[in-house]
Amino acid sequence: MGKLFVIVDMLNDFINPSGKLYFPKGRSVVDPVVRLRAAFRAAGVPVLYVNDAHPEDSGEFASWPPHCVMGTWGARIIDELHAGPGDIVLGKDALTVFAHGAAEALVTGYGATHLIMAGVATEYCVQACALDARARGLAVTVALDAIAGVDLNEGDAATALEAMRQAGVAFTGADRLLEELG
Ligand SMILES: [Zn+2]
C-alpha cells in the first residue's frame, strides 16, 4: 500500500511564538513530527507538506486575522522542519489541500492509498484534509500525539476527533508508528 507522510501547517504563523495565529499547544508536536519525518524518510515514504499559502485578499481572512500570506515569514515552514530534497510541498488557500486539484493528482501520481497525518490544527486543517482524503477512498491514520488543537471553544478538538473516527480515520501514536517503521 503506497503511503505518504503528510505534515499539515507546521508554519511560523501557527507554531512560532511570534506567529500571527500562534497557539502554545502547537509547540508540543514539533518534536514528534521531527522524529516521524526522519523515520518515514528512512523508510522511503515520501513526505508531503500541506501548507497554508494565502493571497493577501484571501476569502479566509473574512473569518480569521490575516496569516500565512504567500511569500511572508509567517507562511514558511518552521526551522526545525524545513523541507529537504525529495519532499513535496503543496500550498493551499483553504482548510483542505483537496480544494486544489493538484493534491488529488499528486496523491494518485504517487500511487498513494494511505495518508499518515501529523501537524496542526486538529479541528481545522488536519480534520478537513483527513475527511477529504477519506471521501476520496484513501486510508488515513492520524498520529494523535503529533497533532494539536486550538480549542477556541473548549471541546472543539475532541469533536473533530470524533468526526474523523466516524469517517473511518484510524488513530495511533508517534511511538507506535516509529516502532512499526523500525
Ligand atoms: Zn489559513
Image (cartoon, rainbow, N blue to C red):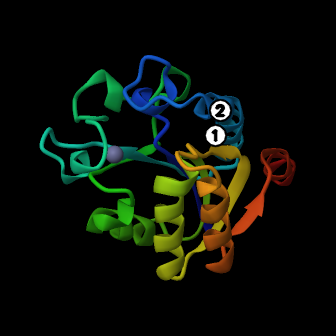
Q: What amino acid does circle 1 point to?
A: Arg
Q: What amino acid does circle 2 point to?
A: Val
The vertical placement of 54 against 83, above or below, is below
The vertical placement of 69 against 178, above or below, is above
The vertical placement of 38 against 5, above or below, is above
How many numbered marks have been drawn onto this rendered protein structure? 2
- Residue at left offset 63%, top offset 64%: 159
x then y, percent, for residue 131: 52, 71
Label 2, label 1: how many angstroms apart (C-alpha)? 5 Å
Disc 1 packing (10 Å; few <14; some 14–19; many ≥20): many
Determine whether label 2 and label 1 are within 8 Å by CB: yes
Residue extending furthest toward the left: 57
Q: Which secondary structure lies at badge 2? A: helix
Q: Which secondary structure lies at badge 1? A: helix
Q: Is mark 2 within 8 Å of ligand 1?
A: no
x then y, percent, for residue 83: 46, 33
Disc 2 packing (10 Å; few <14; some 14–19; many ≥20): some
The answer to whether one can see residue 1 in this image is no
- Would you say 117 lies left or right of 20 here? right
For the residue pair 170 and 36, the one nearer the viewer reads as 170
| Residue assigned mark 2 | 34
The vertical placement of 105 against 12, above or below, is below
The quadrant the N terminus occupies is: bottom right
| Residue assigned mark 1 | 37
x then y, percent, for residue 51: 39, 44
In which quadrant of the rendered view does residue 163 lie?
bottom right
Residue extending furthest toward the top: 18
